[in-house]
Amino acid sequence: MTAGINAREDEAEQGSIYWKRNLWVALAGSFTTIVAMTLLLPFLPLYVEELGAKGRPAIAQWSGIAYGATFFAAALVAPLWGRLGDIYGRKLMLVRASAGMTIAISLMGMAGAVWQLVALRLVVGLAGGYSSGSMVLVATQTPKNRSAAALGLLSSGIMAGNLIGPLVGGVLPPVIGIRNTFLAAGGIIFLAFLATCFLIREEKGPPKTDRAAKTGGWSAIPNKQPVIAMLICGMLLMLANMSIEPIITVYVVQLVGDASTVTIAAGIVMSGAALGSILSAPALGRLADRIGHWPVIAAALAVAGVLLVPQAFVTEIWQLIGLRFLMGLALGGLLPTISAVIRHSVPHHAAGGILGLSVSSQYVGQVSGPILGGFVGGHVGMPAVFLGTAVIMMSGSVFVFIAMPKRRAAP
């Protein structure tokens, strides 16, 4: 039986013959689901007020709770969905996620109270995870020597969704109304559900009756050090990235003389890093496939740390936009490359559960980053946020360099 399992593992390392089609369907599905999830950001406070929240403090509080509910729930269940994907198939997890998100997001347009909106946001987090599930599917179905490039392309689609979603959310509500916007978003995800059902072809690894499928998870990892290093690296990356978000608008106020252009300028600053990441992710993925994943991760963290320092001392808005764009270029390939290292460090039959754990660690950074950034910016000063984040990035680079396997070209 062991020989049979090993043979199936070797086949899995070669990837599926359908991996390119799976990649493009997962890319389209991830893009549309992320757009549907993020388009509510521009009008969330307005909808919260419409649902009964009175006064600016209550609106801000409920908007924050509703926004964070999805990430909190997703962090709790990501390892579970990953493990179930190992047992029953990753395509099934994408079907489940797209179906659940279609229903929950559509129902948001029918909410009658704020608590119902929060509850549905929790459901989206519990039932969702299409983009993270796509990462697992692509990582396990793509040939080993092409995985970082494929994950980089998929990551670009996810980041593009994060960039386009708020823009769509700013245009649709005045045209069709807030509630109909949620229904439209549900319809978009339903299309992703149909594409996932009928176009994705998954070649599974060892079936669930095999011993390998029953002993997946942490105990199945032969060398846990690279996985632990990547879990920490992913958390630090998201913490450092998100720590800047709460202070961007306030920081821009100091750089822009005309108050009427502050929101536009802040949006351009936020989009600069995302645009840089979209452009660089596929190229950094291909580079990592050629020279090794660890050196790319260490170098990208170091460059980002260096670029954060001058952001604390800019005097013109164009300087901040340019530096954020360059930082996005440096960081674009990090998350898919981290996923590639984890994928190559665990057996095929345990990949989903461990990649799900990686998603959870990133959500921890995504939730704690804004909290820490807002606290430091409010009590110490906004330049301290950039400098503190630079220290985190450089420390992460040193950590990755120390944890790097002796054979640096190996992932």
Image: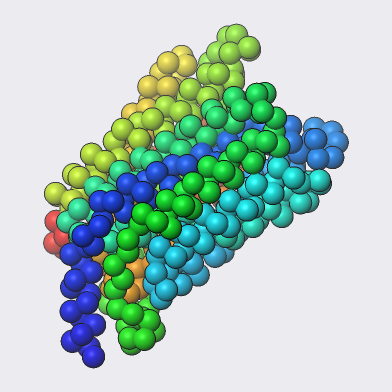
**Residue closest to the far top:** 258
Residue at the spot 69% in from the left edge and 49% down from the top edge: 107
**Residue closest to the far front:** 198
**Residue closest to the far bottom:** 1
Question: Where does the N terminus fall, quadrant-wise?
Answer: bottom left
Q: How many marks?
A: 0
Image: 126 above or below 348: above
Image: 283 above or below 148: above
Residue 68 placement, left or right of 366: right
What colouring style does the render use?
rainbow
Residue 108 placement, left or right of 215: right
Residue 398 appears at what percent x and percent y? Answer: 30, 51
- Residue 124 in sight here: yes
Residue 370 appears at what percent x and percent y? Answer: 57, 43
Residue at the spot 14% in from the left edge and 49% down from the top edge: 291
Residue 170 falls in image quadrant: top right
Foreground pick, 228 / 198: 198
Residue 206 falls in image quadrant: bottom left
Residue 297 appears at what percent x and percent y? Answer: 28, 48
Image: 293 above or below 212: above
Residue 29 appears at what percent x and percent y? Answer: 43, 47
Residue at the spot 42% in from the left edge and 16% down from the top edge: 318
Residue at the spot 18% in from the left edge and 44% down from the top edge: 287
Question: Where does the C terminus fall, quadrant-wise?
Answer: bottom left
Residue 44 falls in image quadrant: top right
- Residue 83 in sight here: no
Foreground pick, 168 / 17: 17
Residue 37 placement, left or right of 202: right
Foreground pick, 258 / 275: 275
